[in-house]
């Protein structure tokens, strides 16, 4: 969602597609309303915003390939999501397409370089698409800090050496970043600063954890 909002700075025609059939994130009407208000077209499963957990691919997803502006497609982190996107992989092989794998080094299967490289190989095979870059999104939710992100970069770069995939950029919540870290980390790695747009059901407006 933050990536789509950033793209909106330079394009009047931005689409965000939720293809995560396992954990669709548009269960929040507030998040959808915020994106629509920002001029972003949202394509999400028909069950998003409900209590129904039936995997479903949005019927109008193919329309993004006929648009003139950029689109962000979230396929989730499971091989099932990768297999879903493989059904239109030929439309995703153009020179203007980037396939990115978002990595949190604090998760069990992506906590070390060999594990990350293996996961990349698995997802790439399931999707039938080459992964063009890693996004370092290492975090511990409310317990995140900038040092954790910095410590993860060497791990991700080693994974990239193994898999032949560069680190495209890092991303982190604004409240966990030192002042002055806006568009890049101290070593020059590009940075996407994230604003909190979704909350878990057990959170209320007074809890930013």
Image (tube, grey):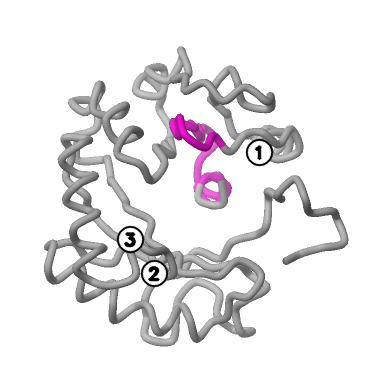
| Mark 3 and mark 1: Cα distance apart in space | 32 Å
Q: Nearer the viewer, residue 81 or 8?
A: 81
The residue at the point 54 percent across, 34 percent down is: 24
Magenta-colored stretch includes residue 6: yes
Q: Which residue is mark 1?
A: 35
The image shows residue 11, relative to residue 165, as above or below, that is above
| Residue 155: quadrant of the picture | bottom left
Identify the residue shown where x is 19% and y is 57%.
118
Q: Nearer the viewer, residue 119 or 44?
A: 119
Classify the position of the C terminus by image quarter.
bottom right
The CA distance from mark 2 to mark 1 is 28 Å
Say which quarter of the image contains residue 38: top right
Q: CA distance from mark 3 to mark 2?
A: 8 Å
Q: Is residue 128 left or right of residue 48?
A: left
The residue lying toward the viewer, choosing from 77 and 4, is 77
Identify the residue at horizontal 71%, vertical 50% (top origin): 199
Q: Residue at x 44, y 70 (%)?
A: 106
Looking at the rendered image, the disc whose residue lies closer to the viewer, 2 or 1, is 2
Find the residue positioned furthest to the top. Answer: 59
User: What label does residue 105 carry, if any?
Assistant: 2
Q: What label sits on residue 109 in the rendered view? A: 3
Measured as percent of width and height from the top left, residue 25 is found at 58, 38
In the image: residue 104, left or right of residue 110: right
Callout 2 crowding tier (Cα within 10 Å): few <14, some 14–19, many ≥20: many
Q: Are marks 3 and 2 in contact (CB under 8 Å)?
A: no
Q: Residue furthest right?
A: 206
Image coordinates of residue 196 in percent, x first then y, are: 67, 57
Q: Secondary structure at mark 3?
A: helix
Answer yes or no: do the residues labelled 3 and 1 have beta carbons within 8 Å?
A: no
Taking 116 as reference, is 80 above or below it? above
Part of the protein shown in magenta? 4-24
């Amino acid at each position: 969602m933050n990536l789509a909002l950033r793209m909106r700075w330079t394009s009047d025609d931005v689409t965000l597609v939720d293809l995560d059939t396992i954990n669709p994130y548009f269960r929040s009407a507030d998040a959808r309303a915020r994106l629509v208000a920002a001029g972003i077209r949202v394509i999400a499963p028909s069950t998003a915003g409900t209590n129904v957990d039936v995997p479903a691919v949005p019927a109008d997803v193919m329309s993004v390939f006929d648009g003139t502006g950029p689109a962000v497609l979230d396929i989730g982190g499971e091989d099932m999501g990768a297999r879903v996107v493989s059904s239109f992989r030929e439309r995703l092989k153009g020179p203007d397409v980037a396939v990115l794998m978002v990595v949190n080094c604090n998760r069990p299967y992506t906590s070390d370089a060999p594990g990350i490289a293996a996961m990349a190989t698995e997802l790439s095979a399931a999707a039938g698409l080459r992964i063009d870059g890693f996004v370092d999104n290492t975090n511990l939710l409310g317990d995140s800090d900038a040092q954790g992100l910095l410590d993860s970069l060497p791990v991700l770069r080693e994974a990239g050496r193994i898999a032949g995939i560069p680190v495209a950029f890092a991303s982190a919540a604004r409240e966990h970043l030192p002042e002055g870290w806006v568009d890049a980390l101290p070593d020059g790695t590009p940075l996407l600063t994230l604003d909190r747009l979704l909350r878990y059901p057990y959170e209320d407006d007074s809890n930013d954890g």
